[in-house]
Amino acid sequence: MCGIIVAASASTCGSGLLDDMQRSLEKLRHRGPDGSGALVSSEEGGIMVSLGHTLLSIVGDNATQPITCSTKNRKYHLVHNGEVYNHRELRERILAEKWCSCTDFEAGSDSEVLLACLAHKGVDWTLENVRGMFAFVLVEIQGDSLVKIIMSRDPFGIKPLCYAISQGNVIISSEISAFPEDVLSLTVSDVLPSRSIELLLVAGEWILREQSYFDPIISSSICGEYSDNDICSTIQKALIDAVRIRMPATKVNMGVLLSGGLDSSLITGIAADLVHPSTLNTFEEGLEALPKVIRCIETVDPAMVRAGVPLYILSGKIARKGFKVLLCGEGAGETFAGYRLFEKFHPSLARDCDEFEAELERLLRNIDTSELQRVDRCTSAHGLEARVPFLDLNAWCSSFSSC
């Protein structure tokens, strides 16, 4: 969990936006209390690009960003928020294919691997093979000229990313709160989950090209006949693996948000089987609520605020105990129809089956602006990274025959 801020200007009036980089980084300090970095690149034709990043150090010894990678005729700058859980496998793969050498991974961070994949294998290949939660901005330069800026989010939108464009200037950030004040009057858009967006500068104007790399379509066979044993075995294996890869390999304090419900209890049970029970810490979400977190969660939705207040207070207490990583049970209700609203459906009826599938899809397509936004903002406000095993893409696909 980190903070991202990127500003690009194709006009002289954009210099003020670039000057605001340090102020924006300060506004994102809660997302990355372990350090920060900034890079300003002045390109031919007056185009300026500035990248900033605040760091929550979990993977690697010196994971400060932005980071840079060069190929034969291109140079790439990257800022990345999130975690690539299969970075070791990807690293070995691109080393075996001789795209890179070991010296390209001196910090040992997952972001180094992500950048190497993007630079040498391309965006499409990377998004197809990366397993994790992420939001990133990639700046591609050829010679002295800006080629394009690429921004992307993970399949379910666990990590946030938004942007605004005006008069040849573009601002990209993890949170609206980090935008310069004169940008807040503009229309701010989210990079949607499972999307990558190319920003190309044409005649002084930014042109957007959006592409979807994953679509959570619920299979029409969801209401069919299955062997209970086969389903349970498949989901069990996938979920155990999803929890396993989210356990920090480094000596980082990790806990589990345990509400006492089925979802978080299941995650806690699996985690306890994977580590020595004495090393697992759980925190109950039963603390008295305090009502001032609207700015943190960036919404006034009553349900979000109600659920966000206790999590915000609890996250502060957890952070003060020295923890950095939390496992949580979000995504289970949307994947396995765990909410009470699904009780009205009878999957044996064709009409109900169609409506049931449509409601599941609706919840999944909007989870980034509901449950995931609440969890990300309330935990990151205190320098915590929340990990969501139920929304591991492999685990999710194992529940549906459409993947």
Image: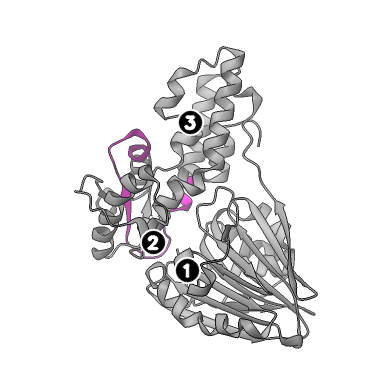
Q: Is residue 339 above or below residue 225?
A: below
Residue bearing mark 1: 3
Of circles 3 and 1, the one toward us is 1
Indicate yes or no whether the magenta region holds residue 253: yes
Which residue lies at the image location 31% right of the left edge and 45% below the top edge?
Answer: 306
Which residue lies at the image location 60% right of the left edge and 66% below the top edge?
Answer: 164
Indicate yes or no whether the magenta region holds residue 378: no
| Callout 1 amino acid | Gly
Contact check, label 1 and label 2, Cβ < 8 Å: yes
Residue bearing mark 2: 380
* Residue at the extreme left: 288
Where the N terminus falls, by quadrant? bottom left
Residue 338: percent from left, percent from top: 43, 30
Q: Secondary structure at mark 2?
A: helix
Q: Mark 2, residues whose alpha carbon is within 10 Å: few (<14), some, or many (≥20)?
A: many
Alpha carbon separation for disc pair 2 and 3: 27 Å
Q: Secondary structure at mark 1?
A: strand
Contact check, label 3 and label 1, Cβ < 8 Å: no
Residue bearing mark 3: 336
Stretch of the chain drawn in magenta: 242-266
Residue 315: percent from left, percent from top: 29, 57
Q: Is residue 328 visible?
A: yes
Q: Is residue 217 above or below residue 37?
A: above
Alpha carbon separation for disc pair 3 and 1: 31 Å
